[in-house]
Image (cartoon, rainbow, N blue to C red):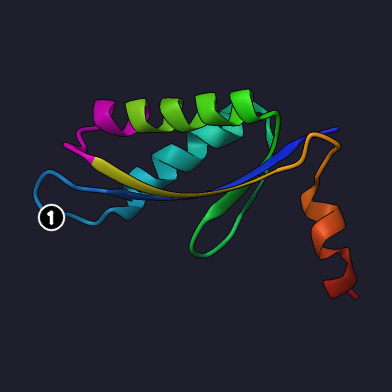
Amino acid sequence: MANTLLSIQVIPKTPNNEDSIPYVDKAIEVIQKSGVKHQVNPLETTMEGDITELLEVVRQMHEALIAAGSPSIISQIKIAHNPNGISMDKLTEKYRP
């Protein structure tokens, strides 16, 4: 069972003040390729897994954005960690019909 939820919002600087959405899409691609359970939301993406694995995904996201031409990135990250287990489904099930 997963022990961590990590929500991340990347705010990449763009080379010529262009639209940042293509850069955000590249960051989400890294998450998708990682294979971790995740949910894309309008303002952030939440991942579920082992804390070490999720932090590695964050590192890879930053590297991908730099490689795509972003001169710098700010990420806002929220982490919920419970060694006994935690899941997106469990935390949100009471809000689903």
Q: Residue at x 76, y 35 (%)?
A: 3
Residue 35 vs 92, above or below: the answer is above
Residue at numbered disc 1: 17
Image point 26% across, 25% down: which residue? 67
Q: Say whether residue 94 is visible.
A: yes
State whether residue 96 is above or below residue 47.
Answer: below
Q: In which quadrant will I find the C terminus? A: bottom right
Rendering coords of residue 51 (x, y %): 64, 30
Please say if 6 is above or below 41: above
Q: Give the image location of residue 14, x and y in percent.
A: 18, 47
Q: Residues within 10 Å of mark 1 (few under 14, many from 20)?
A: few
Amino acid tagged 1: Asn
Judged from this view, the residue extending furthest toward the left is: 16
Of 69 and 11, the residue lying toward us: 11
In the visual, does 95 lie left or right of 7?
right
Question: Residue placed at 89% from the left, 71% from the top?
Answer: 94
Image mark count: 1
Where disc 1 sits, the SS reads loop
> Horizontal and vertical percent for residue 62?
36, 32
Is residue 20 placed above or below 65 in the rendered structure?
below
Q: Quadrant of the N terminus?
A: top right
**Left or right of 8 on screen, residue 54:** right
- Which stretch appears magenta? 64-72
Along the line of sight, the residue nearer the viewer: 57 or 34: 57
Locate residue 68, reporting x and y percent: 26, 31
Residue 34, magenta (yes or no): no
Is residue 97 found left or right of 29 in the rendered image? right
